[in-house]
Amino acid sequence: MSYATQKLAEEKVFKDPVHRYVHVRDQVIWDLINSREVQRLRRIKQLGTSYLVFHGAEHSRFNHSLGVYEIVRRISDDIFHGRPEWDESERLVVLCAALLHDLGHGPFSHSFEKVFALDHEAFTRKILLGDTEVNGILSKVSTGFPEKVAEVIAKTYSNKQVVSLISSQIDADRMDYLQRDAYYTGVSYGHFDMERILRVMRPLDDQVVIKSSGMHAVEDYIMSRYQMYWQVYFHPVARSAEVILRKILQRAKELHGLGYKFAQPPTHFLSFFDRSFTLKEYLALDEGVLMTYFQLWMTERDPILADLCDRFVNRRLFQYVDFDPGKDYKKLGELAQLFHSAGIDPEYYLIDDSTSDLPYDFYRPGEEEERLPIHLLMPNGDIKELSRLSQIVDAISGKRRTDYKLYFPAELLIDGKKKAIKQQILEMLREGGV
């Protein structure tokens, strides 16, 4: 028996709050789960700083990865199995891609990526193809197998059905994180009838389609996603924590460049500051490492770095007001000058932040971020794009919503010196959002 088809002597199961159980029979999958690179995901939160708002959101990218794997396993082994339109030989590559799709995430991933201009998907591919335990396991399957898995994650794999199961507008990744994040945050928005959606999924030509009888379940899924983004993922308080986190890393980077002598040198970050880091150094970082530095830096001589770290560790977050960059851009410049006059550095204490989401879109050739639509399979065999039949989806199709906030430390504007200037700042901030 080849390694690719080798089964465990006894099925392994993980108890899971979303899917009840995650089932593992393949030796390859079991070996991947136990690799260093996958185990590292236990030390990276799925929702970054959201735990500072939703105290239950302590779940990791590890249990999300298992969840995506389980959904794809069910689709491959139960829903698609035996259908002529599904190539059974793709089973292992799609299971591996599902399990490993988030492998390249760094600590507090999106904030970390912004500061150091990184791309977690690019690092996922580097881990798959580099000198790693994961690469060694995948290489045992066959020559070129790591490249196949990397192509699925890069969305360049020849079999588009496989790609769409991992990355599309209705994929296993989204179906898991919506339910999982809803469960751990305690909100009701992310729940939808996944069982129904799985039952009406069908492989067809180069895509995965949904039987038209399942349209209402898909509508529910899309609205759940919409609500989760605005109620959880883009929560303004969680964004306040992200702003502070980014500014901590920015400040440490700036101080290093100025030759500042740290009481606790940023050893783990030095190669990131000059972009000379290796894959091994990237994998050595997790949220435990960052939090250790933040706690140590709370006593640094630099008042900005010490204050920002104390704010993040002890949840002393920035306040915020609505901000319209079109109307308020000049006022932002005026505020920055007033902050300077008040002795508060606006680079670190007056930050504008925006979030944006497009809940559903259909294919628009040539546009940035083209999105393959969700197609419905009609009883007569015709294919219809979802928004053409669903009034609910049509109402939000192609409509990007953006939210702007201005973050600042309110308590620094209340007490202390230069009260007249600080009062002027507060009055500007209270004028209907800036």
Image (tube, helix red, strand yellow):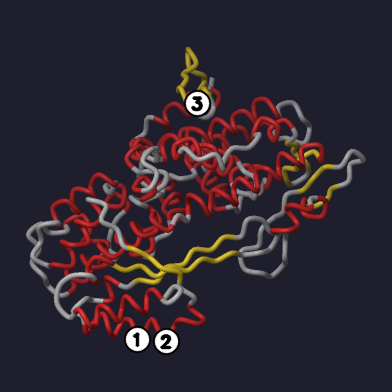
Residues under numbered marks 2 and 1 in contact, where contact means CB atoms less than 8 Å apart: yes
- Callout 2: SS: helix
Label 1 environment density (alpha carbons within 10 Å; few <14, some 14–19, many ≥20): few
Residue 428, located in which quarter of the rendered image?
Answer: bottom left
The residue at which mark 1 appears reads as: 334
Residues under numbered marks 3 and 1 in contact, where contact means CB atoms less than 8 Å apart: no
The image shows residue 411 at horizontal and vertical percentages of: 24, 65
What is the three-letter code of the residue carrying label 3? Answer: Tyr
The image shows residue 413 at horizontal and vertical percentages of: 24, 72
The residue at which mark 2 appears reads as: 330
From the viewer's perspective, tell me whether residue 67 is left or right of residue 381.
left
Q: Which residue is located at x 43 percent, y 34 percent?
A: 63
Q: CA distance from mark 2 to mark 3?
A: 64 Å
* Nearer to me, 353 or 108: 353
What is the three-letter code of the residue carrying label 2? Answer: Lys
Q: Which residue is located at x 34 percent, y 48 percent?
A: 52
Give the answer, above or below, for where 367 lies relative to 376.
Answer: below
Q: Extreme top residue here?
A: 9
Q: CA distance from mark 2 to mark 1?
A: 6 Å
- Callout 1: SS: helix
The residue at which mark 3 appears reads as: 3
The image shows residue 415 at horizontal and vertical percentages of: 18, 70
